[in-house]
Amino acid sequence: MIDRHLKPRGNILIFTIFILFASALLGILVSIMMRDFLKYSNENAHYHQANALAKSASELWFMLIGESRAGFDFKWNGDGLIKANFSCPVEKNEKEECWLPRSFSLKIKGLKNQISTFLKPGQSLTLPTFWHTVGDFRLAGIQGRSHIPTVDNPSDFKHSIVEENVQENNNWETSITKPGNYQQGADNRYYVVSNLDSKNGKQLNVSSSDGSSPLFDGTFNMTVEGKYGDKVVSKEYQLNQALPDFLQSDNYLE
């Protein structure tokens, strides 16, 4: 006679094995998800570190531009600055490098050998007769042009040298002279090319006459790059430098 109260041990064993298998599979899936999550977290952290380094480089550039009165070119790599101000994330010997590389660099381009632009009626192009030299991440000096730039079809435009001079009573006065009287020296003079035609716009092409005196049309272009680990963040900026106050008027167009 069969005892109906006996439990089928074979079914319980199969069920137990199934539970163990499902638990192991779930553990593997959780491990894979955690691994991917940690990888994503590290990559995200590295990206933000690289972005912060690129932003730091751009802030240094904005500071340098703010101190300038004319154009300049500049290239810089901040590896030395980073090594001097950041510690390694883990203990390293004195001669060992940090295991996670970090760096930033910047390139500023403000000087040109040739400028081509279209002047509408009454418009002018204003060019400083000097430019900056840069050293140790600061404006190191000023170089003056030896000659006035060369202009194609010069008879189509009016040419002026505009300068602001301080008088005996400490008042500033704007003087306007012809380019033929230009002499190298002062660092507050500007060469202004104007289209006085009231109806027609004109194409203006300006180039450096001596090949060694660059031009600055008021626009800076910069590329910055921050690197942290395997993440690289690049940013590009363009900044238009404002004209000095004494050039805001149009009295040199008369």
Image (spheres, helix red, strand yellow):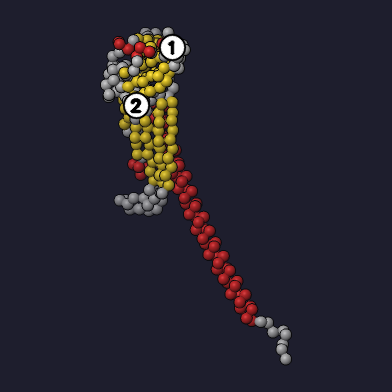
Q: Is residue 210 above or below residue 45?
A: above
Q: CA–CA distance between discs 1 and 2?
A: 27 Å
Q: Residue 172, how many percent across, how many down?
A: 40, 11
Taking the spot 64% from the left edge, 81% from the top edge, the residue there is 9
**Residue 142 in view (yes/no):** no
- Residue 124 lies in quadrant: top left
Residue placed most toward the observer, 158 or 4: 158
**Residue 214 in view (yes/no):** yes
- Residue 226 lies in quadrant: top left
- Residue 27 lies in quadrant: bottom right
Which label number is shown at residue 112?
Answer: 2
Q: In the image, what residue type sits under mark 1? A: Asp
In the rendered image, which residue does mark 1 sit on? 197
Q: Residue 237, how many percent across, how many down?
A: 44, 33
Specify few, some or many for label 1: CA neighbours under 10 Å numbering under 14, 14-19, or 20 or more.
some
Which label number is shown at residue 128?
Answer: none
Q: Residue 97, how many percent across, how many down?
A: 34, 50
Q: Quadrant of the C terminus?
A: top left
Seen in the image, is 252 located left or right of residue 36?
left
The mark lying in front, picked from 1 and 2, is 1
Q: Quadrant of the N terminus?
A: bottom right
Q: In the image, what residue type sits under mark 2? A: Lys
Q: Is residue 65 above or below residue 156?
A: below
Taking the spot 40% from the left edge, 19% from the top edge, the residue there is 203
Q: Earlier in the sequence, mark 1 or mark 2?
A: 2
Taking the spot 38% from the left edge, 43% from the top edge, the residue there is 103
Seen in the image, is 45 located left or right of residue 153?
right
Q: What is the number of callouts on the image? A: 2
Taking the spot 37% from the left edge, 30% from the top edge, the residue there is 109
Q: What is the residue that sits farthest to the bottom in this orientation? A: 1
